[in-house]
Image (tube, grey):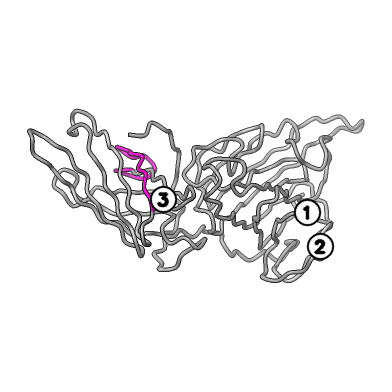
């Protein structure tokens, strides 16, 4: 049984779909139910995470996804397009002790058994699962009439330091590319969408796995990273680097489009230029509240300046990973 702590939440809309993201039809979220008497109709969830070389690790949960009753850590490999994995599930003395979980998945369908030996007899509980895809509620949201559209998939005109041209309607963070908006903003609302690359050869949870960052005013970073199925942390997706971890981690698998909806209140200064009030930020990640009126006492590392100001640009950080952005717009606030 895995003792690793997760804090995960549901994105509001679940979509069953036969398509594969990130060129890996096995990696992602799987859900279903048990059919044996002991766990009949109990929901089960598995997060299938690629770790390179056709190998996968699978956090496996029984019960509600946001507060599971039992969990196991499975390990497996892909064999001729079929994932085969196994692990131990400790259900405690009342639940019959340690069970062995076998998991097999292919073509969007998974099945397996939860098996224990009692009084020299095997007790097997079968289960079935399907791969699911979740759509964030503000994905593709159109800007209001008063919004400043920074990127609509057609032009780089609102950005500085941009080589190349638009080819597929996204801003791609690749080697030597950085994106700094020409306009500067004070208090504002920001909507943007991002997609982290699938990098299974990099260790799960590593900063080398789809790293970028959204810097409000070019100074306060909301981390972008492939943090699918990881515990919340200030240096994982949704974290305010060196300031605060997100309340929960609603990250989707790499290769799927995600959203940030941000309300930012700029720091305030007196007539002599002394700061009298810290900046404040509220962030929804995939429609889930992860920071609520959080004070920002200072800029985060890696931005355009460590000196705070009334206004600043939107800055999308380059770490050399092929992170993509689209549908970026800003509403200025009084």
* Residue at the image point whose x is 55% and y is 42% from the top: 290
Q: CA distance from mark 2 to mark 3?
A: 36 Å
Residue annotated with mark 1: 176
* Residue at the image point whose x is 36% and y is 61% from the top: 80
- What kind of element bears circle 1? loop
Residue annotated with mark 2: 163
Q: Position of residue 252 (x, y in %)?
A: 50, 52
- What kind of element bears circle 3? strand
Q: Position of residue 77 (x, y in %)?
A: 38, 51
- What kind of element bears circle 2? loop
Q: Is residue 206 left or right of residue 325?
A: left
Q: Is residue 154 left or right of residue 245?
A: right
Q: Is residue 169 left or right of residue 182?
A: left
In the image, which residues are magenta?
Answer: 61-77
N-terminal-most mark, 2 or 3: 3
Label 2 crowd (10 A; few <14 / some 14-19 / many >=20): few
Mark number for residue 333?
none
Task: Identify whether 230 is placed above or below 332.
Answer: above
Q: Position of residue 108 (x, y in %)?
A: 36, 63
| Quadrant, the N terminus | top left
Mark number for residue 48?
3
The answer to whether the residues at label 2 and label 3 have Cβ atoms under 8 Å apart is no
Q: CA distance from mark 1 to mark 2?
A: 9 Å
* Magenta span includes 62: yes
| Frontmost residue, 95 versus 79 | 79
Which residue is outermost to the right?
272
| Frontmost residue, 138 versus 161 | 161
N-terminal-most mark, 1 or 2: 2
* Residue at the image point whose x is 76% and y is 39% from the top: 302
């Amino acid at each position: 049984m895995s003792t690793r702590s997760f804090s995960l939440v549901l994105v509001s809309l679940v979509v069953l779909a036969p398509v594969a993201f990130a060129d890996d039809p096995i990696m992602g979220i799987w859900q279903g139910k048990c059919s044996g008497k002991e766990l009949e109709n109990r929901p089960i969830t598995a997060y299938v995470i690629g770790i390179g070389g056709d190998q996968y690790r699978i956090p496996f949960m029984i019960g509600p996804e946001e507060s599971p009753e039992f969990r196991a850590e499975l390990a497996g490999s892909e064999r001729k397009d079929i994932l085969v994995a196994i692990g131990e599930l400790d259900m405690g003395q009342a639940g019959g002790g340690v069970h062995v979980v076998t998991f097999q998945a292919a073509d969007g369908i998974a099945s397996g058994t939860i098996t224990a030996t009692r009084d020299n007899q095997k007790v097997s509980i079968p289960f079935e699962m399907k791969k699911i895809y979740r759509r964030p509620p503000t994905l593709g949201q159109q800007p209001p009439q008063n919004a400043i559209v920074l990127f609509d998939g057609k032009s780089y005109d609102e950005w500085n330091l941009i080589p190349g041209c638009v080819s597929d309607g996204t801003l791609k963070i690749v080697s030597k590319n950085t994106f700094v908006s020409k306009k500067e903003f004070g208090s504002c609302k920001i909507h943007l969408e991002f997609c982290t690359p699938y990098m299974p050869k990099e260790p799960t949870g590593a900063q080398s796995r789809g790293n970028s960052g959204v810097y409000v005013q070019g100074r306060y970073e909301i981390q972008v990273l492939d943090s699918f199925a990881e515990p919340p942390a200030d240096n994982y997706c949704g974290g305010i680097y060196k300031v605060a971890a997100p309340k929960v981690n609603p990250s989707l698998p790499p290769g799927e489009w995600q959203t940030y909806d941000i309300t930012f209140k700029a720091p305030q200064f007196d007539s002599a230029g002394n700061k009298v009030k810290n900046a404040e930020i509220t962030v929804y990640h995939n429609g889930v509240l992860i920071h609520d009126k959080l004070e920002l006492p200072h800029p985060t590392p890696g931005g355009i300046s460590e000196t705070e100001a009334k206004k600043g640009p939107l800055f999308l950080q380059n770490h050399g990973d092929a992170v993509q952005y689209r549908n970026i717009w800003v509403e200025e606030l009084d």
